[in-house]
Amino acid sequence: MTNASILIYENNYQFLFFTPLAVLVGWALYTYLENRRKITILLNSEGRSNARASRKMSNIGLTTLITETKSNPSVPVTYMVLEGILTRKEAIEIVEKVIQDPFLIRFRSVVVRDARSYVEVPDFDVSKHIFSHHLESESVLEAVEAARNQPLDESKPLWEFHLLQDRKESTERPSHSVLCMKAHHCLGDGMSSMLMLAKLSDQREAIEANLAKLERLQRSSKKSMNIRVAVGRIFHLLVYLSRTFRLVLHFLLALCIRSEPQTIFNRPGTGTRRLSSTKNFKVMDIKAVAKRHNATINDTTLSCVAGAIRKALLLKGSVSDKLVLRAAIPVNIRSSTEEIQETCNKFSSFIIDFPVGISNPIDRLLCIKHKMSDMKHSWAKYFLYCSLQAFSYLPETILKPMTYYAGSKLTLAISNVNGGALSCSFAKHKMVELHAFVPPPPNLNLGVLVLTVGDELHWDISIDESVGVDPHDFARYVEEELTVLKGENAK
């Protein structure tokens, strides 16, 4: 390269670098304006009286809708086991009591893909979304798997309730009912689903009163400002900024340069998901394990999943000591005082390295603890959230491959949800179990949800058939990993 060409390159480097970015921003702006035009046309065609019935889809909700595949829809599934026999009539009445609540506007609305909006259905009929099945020879999980793998009807609001009735009563297992809810991710995230279940419960008023009281307490607990507090905040601001810059730089370099190690968990998926759950564990027992190592309960549950992945890989072959797999961990970014007006998607993700190659469970836990601490004490999650908001305005032809490319840099998605107290009941049928299964991004084959209910928690696991690992075996590996950590804790 001649000196002249080097000079030209240096003078135009910034232009060359920012040209693709400018094109993407231009596309995003064009798409936003075009969508507003379509929504205006839609509202004008329906008339002014129906204007309030249509609303723009949230950016993240839209992304979950247009990046899914037919074989792997973005549909979380939740099911709860209730005492006694809940009839379909009772299930319909439970939903009819609250369906007109403004919080559930999306559950009364159909999705208009072209306009990227929801349109409320007049005279909405709940009964068209509630189905009843009798369990014969199949297990509850098999019935839930079958319901999960059936596509939703896009001519209706994207949710269904499946009532699975087991009438085989015995002294060991009395009659019970299973209420399975499948709702598309574009309607709301995990917190939205838990709040919806609270509204459906017999304890709705008490739960809402407790939430309102908690919000008031958090608003009133703000610290008064003085010089000491101001200096402390400035110091923390600088620490957060430096850590955020380092983590974002690491994330971008990994996204552009690093390839995710190919394991059995990265095989092309079939779309058929197998489900399983671990047994319940006392939260206090896991807290005792975490406390010994100055970690959190979340760190410990993540470490157990990393250990289960390692064991699954060891049974299929050898594992390199340096093997690191990446996990996406959705996190709620609502403020503690934010009033949630309706179901929605307001979450970001931590991108965490899982040190699967580390053989010592304690060392693995400490490594994950360090990674999680870095992410929690930074604003990296807000960077990713804003990036998702911006990219959602891109044309579908660009957004889809970008999403799949980002997903190719990951191996699993793992969530942590607090399901509240177990003392809830529905039409006076007490809830005795609650399970939820997250849909990982379309090209990921492993999804794990750590669900806390009352003073117990468990892991709910969803694995694509292509992995070749039985989900019940994987659940056992998680339990064994926790047993090892408990044993180390007792020493």
Image: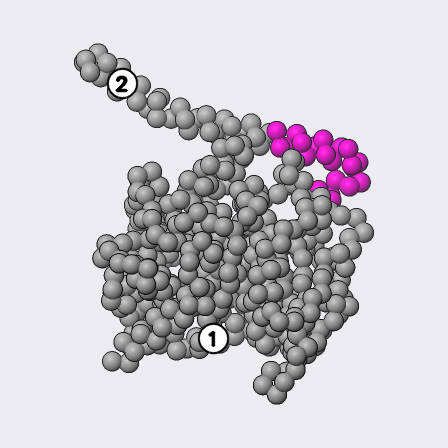
Near-viewer residue (43 or 124)? 124
Label 2 crowd (10 A; few <14 / some 14-19 / many >=20):
few
40 left or right of 215? right
Near-viewer residue (268 or 323)? 268
Instruction: Please state the horizontal and vertical placement of residue 22, each as a whole percent of the image.
Output: 44, 26
Asked if residue 398 is positioned above or below residue 300 in the image, the reply reads above
The segment highlighted magenta reads 34-54
Name the disc covering residue 280, or none: 1
Query: Quarter-wise, where is residue 180 in the image?
Result: bottom right
Instruction: Please state the horizontal and vertical placement of residue 156, each as a whole percent of the image.
Output: 71, 49
**Element under label 2?**
helix
* Residue 93 visible within the image: yes
Name the disc covering residue 9, or none: 2
Instruction: Please state the horizontal and vertical placement of residue 436, each as a whole percent of the image.
Output: 54, 63
Disc 1 to disc 2, C-alpha distance = 62 Å
- The quadrant of the rendering that contains the C terminus is bottom left
Asked if residue 331 is positioned above or below residue 475 in the image, the reply reads above
